[in-house]
């Protein structure tokens, strides 16, 4: 069986865009997660997500793995972008849309 650490590593490696959040994109459980989903959705690229409320191991381990204490966490192309404030700021500058589009093109993760 994989350790939680290995599970996190695999999720981040296998998904070009992954959001660790409270709840799900359809039913976020906190305002910050809801905002992050809204921003990501309006960028128009598909993204994976993990509901940390249903995965207490990941909820406990990810802040250590990422060296980032809070959720949501957006990972793009294996790198932690950050939480809600950073995502919003990048989106408002148009940087997030560009980054996500490039990652999807680069990884060939297109429908």
Image: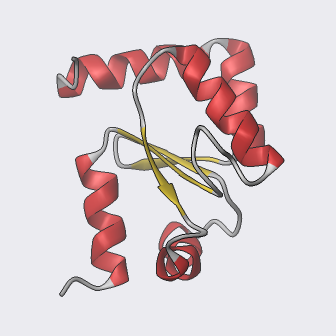
Q: Position of residue 61 (x, y in %)?
A: 51, 80
For the C terminus, the image quarter is top left
Looking at this rendering, what residue extends furthest in the right direction? 31
Residue 28 locus on image (x, y percent): 68, 47
Nearest the eye: 44 or 73 = 44
Which image quarter: residue 2? Answer: bottom left
Residue beneath the point at 57% across and 27% down: 40
Please determine whether, in this image, residue 38 is positioned above or below residue 92.
below
Number of numbered discs overlaid on the protein picture:
0
Q: Residue at x 70, y 46 (%)?
A: 33
Residue drawn where x is 71% and y is 64% of the image: 70
In front of the other: 48 or 10: 48
Q: Above or below — where is 92 with respect to 1?
A: above
25 left or right of 36? left
Q: Nearer the viewer, residue 28 or 2?
A: 28
- 92 or 109, which is in the foreground? 109
Q: Quadrant of residue 17?
A: top left
State the quadrant of the N terminus.
bottom left
- 110 up-or-down from 6: above or below: above
Colour setup of the view = secondary structure
Q: In the rendered view, does 33 fall on the left or right side of 30? A: left
40 relative to 93 in the view: left or right: left
Residue reaching furthest front? 27
Rendering coords of residue 6 (x, y %): 27, 76
Q: Position of residue 36 (x, y in %)?
A: 67, 37
Say left or right for 56 vs 29: left
Q: Residue at x 63, y 34 (%)?
A: 37
């Amino acid at each position: 069986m994989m350790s939680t650490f290995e599970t996190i590593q695999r999720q981040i490696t296998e998904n070009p865009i992954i959001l660790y959040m409270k709840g799900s994109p359809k039913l976020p459980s906190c305002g910050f997660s809801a905002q992050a989903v809204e921003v990501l959705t309006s960028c128009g690229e598909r993204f994976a997500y993990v509901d940390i409320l249903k995965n207490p191991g990941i909820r406990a381990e990810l802040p250590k793995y990422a060296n980032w204490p809070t959720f949501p966490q957006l990972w793009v192309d294996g790198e932690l972008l950050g939480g809600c404030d950073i995502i919003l700021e990048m989106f408002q500058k148009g940087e997030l849309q560009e980054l996500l589009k490039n990652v999807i093109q680069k990884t060939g993760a297109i429908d």
